[in-house]
Image (cartoon, rainbow, N blue to C red):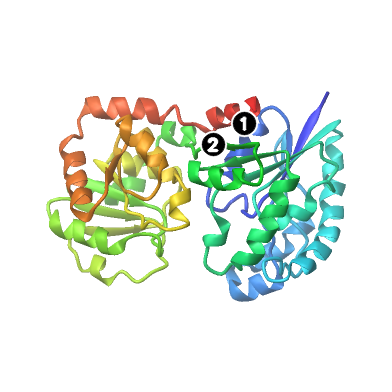
């Protein structure tokens, strides 16, 4: 019996590699996948001019990435779902026709529908699927710009409808389990190929030029990052060089004033492991909030796979397991966080790196897909 999958994603295939693309990639090793990229409307293009080209991506139809994986851009409609859900449902009746027309080409006998956003609740039961999966990475209602009451109501409908839920953190899974008992925790994971790939020397030349010891923050500098703690730590440890890898969406004058803080900007995801391997610790100084309490960020597993310890603030209950097993340092105060960075740098030995990387390189998307498939 042949089986195919439709993944309705809020993320573009070439966007940040989070949970959607890697799982679709793993499934496609065995079965056909139609990955439907995030919606783009005229309003999106007006707000973000760099996305104009995406308005016309649908004209290319389904683009083949591999023999079993195709990408499909949705039709460029209004996409007002988080503000006016009934308009989105009306639009999705049109999108549904477009998606199913391309999905039929797989000629599968069984179809699995994956969704990562409550807006897609109107798709459940209408895509010709045998099984519906809600694959949730974050507490969506905690993101700025959303309408929490509307999203929460849509998500409850979604949870009641789907057959199974996979959530990327324990607290997140606990929340969703109130509405669907078939909810399972499946953590983030690494792309092992990124850690096995050699990168050209020029890709990390600027990192090599910065004196050791180095520690890194990898990710977006945004409101959930405790910049004050980061600046305090860098100020108290002038002998350690702090590498900030990724874009910034917030003001950070205090950090820029410190001579041992280096802004490297966004880097290709295949270069990040090489940067981490040239550091002694990875920093995860998140503020505790409704959003961060419900995540186990990818940067934790990337650090471990690179052989360095993640030093975290106490933002998520999932960290307790990693801390207990010696796979994370958790600072429950500013002083403890700073001390944790010092210990991580002092304890950076070949033996420690081997132990951490052995565990980290087992945390693959292949392993996570194995968990899901067994449910």
Q: Which residue is mark 2?
A: 186
At 64% from the left and 70% from the top, the residue drawn is 44
Quadrant location of the C terminus? Answer: top right
Label 2: few (<14), some (14–19) or many (≥20) C-alpha neighbours in 10 Å? many
Residue 199 visible in the snapshot = no
Percent across and percent down for residue 198 are 40, 35
Q: Which residue is mark 1?
A: 372
Label 1: few (<14), some (14–19) or many (≥20) C-alpha neighbours in 10 Å? some
At 55% from the left and 29% from the top, the residue drawn is 366
Q: Is residue 57 above or below residue 268?
A: below
Residue 281, by quadrant, is top left
315 left or right of 367? Answer: left
Q: Earlier in the sequence, mark 1 or mark 2?
A: 2
Viewer-side residue, 158 vs 311: 158
Percent across and percent down for residue 221 are 38, 61
Q: Is residue 44 above or below residue 29?
A: below
Residue 42 visible in the snapshot = yes
**The residue tagged with tag 1: helix, strand or loop?**
helix
Contact between marks 1 and 2 (CB within 8 A): the answer is yes
**The residue tagged with tag 2: helix, strand or loop?**
loop
Residue 286, by quadrant, is bottom left
Quadrant location of the N terminus? Answer: top right
36 left or right of 49? Answer: right
Percent across and percent down for residue 35 are 70, 45
Percent across and percent down for residue 132 are 74, 41
176 left or right of 281? Answer: right
In the current view of this chain or complex, which residue is farthest to the bottom? 46
At 67% from the left and 54% from the top, the residue drawn is 155
Viewer-side residue, 359 vs 59: 359
Viewer-side residue, 172 vs 263: 172
């Amino acid at each position: 019996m042949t089986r195919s999958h439709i993944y309705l994603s809020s993320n573009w295939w070439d966007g940040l590699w989070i949970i959607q693309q890697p799982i679709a990639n793993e499934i496609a090793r065995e079965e056909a996948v139609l990955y439907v990229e995030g919606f783009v409307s005229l309003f999106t293009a007006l707000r973000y001019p760099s996305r104009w080209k995406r308005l016309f991506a649908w004209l290319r139809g389904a683009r083949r990435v591999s023999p079993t994986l195709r990408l499909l851009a949705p039709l460029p409609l209004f996409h007002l779902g988080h503000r006016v859900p009934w308009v989105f449902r009306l639009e999705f009746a049109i999108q549904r026709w477009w998606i199913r027309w391309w999905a039929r080409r797989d000629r599968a006998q069984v179809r699995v529908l994956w969704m990562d956003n409550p807006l897609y609740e109107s798709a459940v039961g209408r895509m010709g699927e045998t099984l519906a999966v809600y694959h949730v990475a974050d507490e969506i209602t905690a993101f700025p710009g959303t309408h929490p009451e509307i999203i929460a109501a849509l998500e409850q409908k979604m949870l009641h409808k789907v057959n199974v839920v996979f959530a990327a953190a324990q607290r997140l899974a606990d929340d969703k389990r109130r509405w669907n008992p078939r909810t399972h925790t499946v953590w983030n994971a690494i792309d092992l190929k990124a850690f096995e790939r050699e990168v050209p020397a020029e890709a990390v030349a600027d990192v090599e030029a910065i004196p050791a010891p180095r520690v890194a923050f990898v990710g977006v500098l945004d409101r959930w990052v405790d910049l004050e703690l980061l600046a305090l730590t860098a100020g108290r440890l002038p002998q350690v060089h702090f590498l900030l890898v990724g874009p910034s969406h917030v003001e950070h004058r205090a950090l820029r004033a410190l001579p041992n803080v280096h802004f490297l900007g966004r880097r290709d995801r295949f270069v990040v492991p090489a940067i981490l391997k040239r550091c002694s610790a990875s920093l995860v100084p998140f503020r505790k909030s409704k959003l961060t309490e419900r995540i186990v960020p990818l940067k934790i597993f990337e650090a471990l796979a690179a052989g360095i310890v993640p030093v975290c603030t106490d933002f998520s209950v999932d960290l307790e397991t990693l801390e207990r097993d010696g796979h994370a340092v958790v600072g429950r105060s500013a002083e403890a966080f700073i001390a944790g960075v010092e210990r991580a740098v002092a304890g950076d030995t070949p033996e420690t790196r081997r132990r951490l990387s052995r565990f980290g390189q087992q945390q693959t998307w292949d392993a996570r897909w194995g968990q899901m498939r067994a449910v």
